[in-house]
Amino acid sequence: MKSPPKAYENIPFLNSDPCRPVRLQLEYLHPEVTMKEQGVKSTIVLFGSARIPSPETVEACENPQQAALLPFYEEARKLAGMVSTTCQTNHECEYVIVTGGGGGIMEAGNRGAKEVGCKSISLNITLPHEQEPNPYVTEELCFEFRYFHMRKMHFLSRAKAVCIFPGGFGTFDELFEVLTLIQTGKISKMPIILFGTEYWKRLIDWKYLVECGLISPDDLDLLTFCDTAEAAWKIITDYYT
């Protein structure tokens, strides 16, 4: 009689409902241990749409308003290179760029880091329509998550700043979660930088929330708007000096 597989080698069992706590623990431990091994001390988070095209694919974009967002790809790419060359000088890596690992703004962030010879992190997620990791991610720091909440935890656990570029529902979710966590004191205050002043102020009437008494005037101080990589990097460096 053939010996049965050990429990930790039994993939159908590990994917079963009773093993959900085990999977959650593994999704915490694997990135945590790997980042320590790779010397990742802190991160700069880049959120934004996977649908903002790269310069190489912009001609295939039929939506002129979407194509108008192309400059943000370049700004994300530039910011990632700027941050990475400044902060990755040895094995103890500060301000490592972390993205969701997909295309668009995420690709731009990983690309900018790779172009200057530095590492970056990808926190990908299993979706019905598979999102493949972009080709610029550091292979040793490419992770795939089953659970959104574990992925979100890793996004913020080492974050020193969150840079949020134009995006859709997923980007809104990430923005408002980090705002809520800071507002409620669950995580430490850090720069939350919204790239695209016109985009974000047209999209959300932030002052109207204050006028309705739904947020306090001080809550607006959690947000900073900018349009260039240089401005964002100055916001971050000024905050920590």
Image (cartoon, helix red, strand yellow):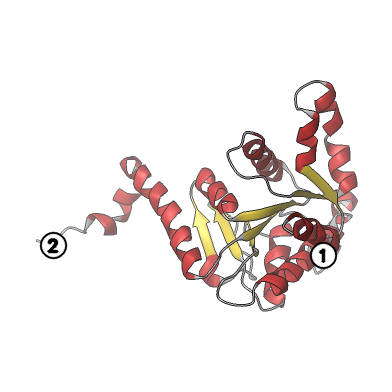
Callout 2, which amino acid? Lys
Numbered circle sitting on residue 164: none
**Left or right: residue 10 compared with residue 4:** right
Q: Which of 147 and 188 is in front in this view?
A: 188
Callout 1, which amino acid? Glu
Compared to residue 179, the image places residue 94 above or below, namely: below
Numbered circle sitting on residue 74: 1
Q: Give the quadrant of residue 200.
A: top right
Location of mark 2 (residue): 2
Q: Residue sitting at 62 percent across and 33 percent down?
A: 184
Q: Which secondary structure, mark 1? A: helix
- Residue 153 horizontal/vertical position (percent): 54, 48
**Neighbours of disc 2 within 10 Å: few (<14), some (14-19), many (20+):** few
Q: How far apart are marks 2 and 1 (CA)?
A: 57 Å
Q: Is residue 104 visible?
A: no
**Left or right: residue 139 compared with residue 60:** left
- Residue 14 horizontal/vertical position (percent): 32, 50
Compared to residue 221, the image places residue 145 above or below, namely: below
- Residue 130 horizontal/vertical position (percent): 57, 54
Q: Which of 182 and 26 is in front in this view?
A: 182
Residue occupying the far front of the picture? 241
